[in-house]
Amino acid sequence: MMFSKLFRNTLLATALALPIVPLTSQNALADERDFLVYNNNELEITQLYVSSTKSKYWGSNILNSDIVNGSSDIVTFGNNSNHCAYDVKAIYSDGTYDVMRQANLCSTYGITFYGHGGDHQ
């Protein structure tokens, strides 16, 4: 009896200690323009800029931390705009960069940068 009570309490404490994570990507990406940036490059992406295609300015770097090779980061929107066309600029640790122009973020789930001033998808 004591063993089962101890087991139950340990199981309950473990379950409560686990972080609560969304079960689907829909929970993580609330705005239809939210997207994942994948880094498929040997260099780290150290800065990322997203700007409306109508703007002449990039604005501020939106990364909280570098995106290393083989990893990704979520870009989320917090404005009420219904604009879908954006330019996305990734700057790498060696200073080279890639720009993806006129990405339709309303229909794009992810953008992959390949680096070396080269291709993106």
Image (cartoon, rainbow, N blue to C red):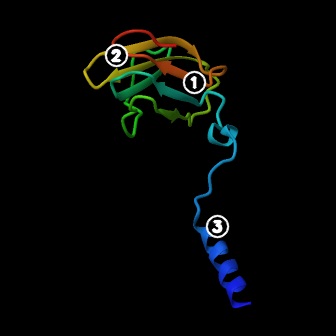
Front one among 102 and 27: 27
Quarter of the image with the N terminus is bottom right
Front one among 101 and 81: 101
Q: Which residue position holds label 1?
A: 110
The reply to whether discs 2 and 1 touch (Cβ–Cβ < 8 Å) is: no
Say which element carries label 1. strand
Residue positioned 69% across, 46% down in the render: 23
* Above-or-below relation of 25 to 7: above
Mark positioned earlier in the residue sequence (1 or 3): 3
Q: Which residue position holds label 2?
A: 97
Amino acid under label 2?
Tyr
Task: Name the spot of residue 49 as percent of width and height, x first.
Answer: 41, 25
Q: Locate residue 34 relative to residue 23 in the image: left or right.
A: left
Instruction: Count residues near mark 3 (Cα–Cα under 10 Å), then give few for <14, some for 14-19, many for 20+.
Output: few
Task: Name the spot of residue 100 as percent of width and height, x first.
Answer: 47, 13
Q: Which residue position holds label 3?
A: 15
* Above-or-below relation of 4 to 109: below
